């Protein structure tokens, strides 16, 4: 029978100190082990060069280091690069590096697949889903940062949790990964450069406000009319708009930071003035800006992007109502790296 060992990174510093002492090793070794294990090129205990042989043997017998690795990469004609990253158990997630105007944005995954059922998103088709450990999200970023230095001549400047999965359904790991990413041993980047995107898990939005998180929040709204939202994102039947608005109001009161609403406009679904008016009503209740996203077609849906005339109607009416609005063009469409196209097809 094979016994699977625990990743040393899932053990707290305190617990590791006790384990070491119980086995006649000095507790200060814990810090050394933790420091080594965060480095992306350290994949086994034998590489931890200042540890005595007896300790390395002890670690090999009792723990493991489940490091992730790049399995495959693909570069788009617009220089976006998509990565397939293999996790220790053979599962794969995708992440994307998006260069633009001197910035390099990393789009990361928080889950393998996604448990939500947004009808317009290719990730929702993936089976075998599980949450990523905090260190798997951290590894993703550190691997991508090395790639950015090598291929884009820059380190990562911005991070969006808009890859596979729903970050708020893996909240603890996302939070801890962000602590690591922003620390000196990570990228040392500001919380302001990080955006977590959610499809609207109201209870966790309130919890984040209570936890006083410092990163930005984006909410995938796509419709401010309950019936339409329930059709395009069926799971929202358990997450009513009223509760979502309440939680966003709570978020704003606590953090004083505006929310970004992500919004897709589809032909025959929300390309009408009733939907525009409802969106404005919500934006007036919650201090926010609107990011209209270009729709990317996927294999699993018949959704069609609305005519440009309707995108312009949205932009004009939002502006007339003094609501900030931007239009996000898709990047990496030719390699299926754009929003909603991550589906492990490599
Ligand atoms: N679960 C999170 C984050 C992942 S999706 C969320 O829902 O926010 C990241 C963004 O891509 C979301 O705004 C999502 O609605 C959008 N998206 C999904 N499928 C898309 C598609 N086919 N075209 C364009 N955007 C899409």
Image (tube, rainbow, N blue to C red):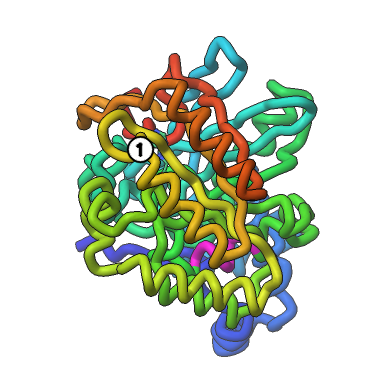
Main SS of residues in magenta = helix
**For residue 289, above or below residue 249:** above
| Left or right: where 131 falls relative to 230 | right
Quarter occupied by the C terminus: top left
Residue at image position (51%, 21%) is: 332
State yes or no: residue 304 in magenta.
no
Q: Is residue 42 visible?
A: no
Secondary structure at badge 1 equals loop
Quadrant of res 326: top right
Q: What residue is shown with label 1?
A: 272
Horizontally, is 276 left or right of 103 in the view? left
Magenta span of residues: 173-178
Determine the image quadrant of residue 306. top left
Question: Image point 61% across, 49% down: which residue?
Answer: 321
Residue 138 in picture, x, y percent from top left = 58, 53
In the rendered image, the vertical position of residue 188 relative to residue 118, given as above or below: below
């Amino acid at each position: 029978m094979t016994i699977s060992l625990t990743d040393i990174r899932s053990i707290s510093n305190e617990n590791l100190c006790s384990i070491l002492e119980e086995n006649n090793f000095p507790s200060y070794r814990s810090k050394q082990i933790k420091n080594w294990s965060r480095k992306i090129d350290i994949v086994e205990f034998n590489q931890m060069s200042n540890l005595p042989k007896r300790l390395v043997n002890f670690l090999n017998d009792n723990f493991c280091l489940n490091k992730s690795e790049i399995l495959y990469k693909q570069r788009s004609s617009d220089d976006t690069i998509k990565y397939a990253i293999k996790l220790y158990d053979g599962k794969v997630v995708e992440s994307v590096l998006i260069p633009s105007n001197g910035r390099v944005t990393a789009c990361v995954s928080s889950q393998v697949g996604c448990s939500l059922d947004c009808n317009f998103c290719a990730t929702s088709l993936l089976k075998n889903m599980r949450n990523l450990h905090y260190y798997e999200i951290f590894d993703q970023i550190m691997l991508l940062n090395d790639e950015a230095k090598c291929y884009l001549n820059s380190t990562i400047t911005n991070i969006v949790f808009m890859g596979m999965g729903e970050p708020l359904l893996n909240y603890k790991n996302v939070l801890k990964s962000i602590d690591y990413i922003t620390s000196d041993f990570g990228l040392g980047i500001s919380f302001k450069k990080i955006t977590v995107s959610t499809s609207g898990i109201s209870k966790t939005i309130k919890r984040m406000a209570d936890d006083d998180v410092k990163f930005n929040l984006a909410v995938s709204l796509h419709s401010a009319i309950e019936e339409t939202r329930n059709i395009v994102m069926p799971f929202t039947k358990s997450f009513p708009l009223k509760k979502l608005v309440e939680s966003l109001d709570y978020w704003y009161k606590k953090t004083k930071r505006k929310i970004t609403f992500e919004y897709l406009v589809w032909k025959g679904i929300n390309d009408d003035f009733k939907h525009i008016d409802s969106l404005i009503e919500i934006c007036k209740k919650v201090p926010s800006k609107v990011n209209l996203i270009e729709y990317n077609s996927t294999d699993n849906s018949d959704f069609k992007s609305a005519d440009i005339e309707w995108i312009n109607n949205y932009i004009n009416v939002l502006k007339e109502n003094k609501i900030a609005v931007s239009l996000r063009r898709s990047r990496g469409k030719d390699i299926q790296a754009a929003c909603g196209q991550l589906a492990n097809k490599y």
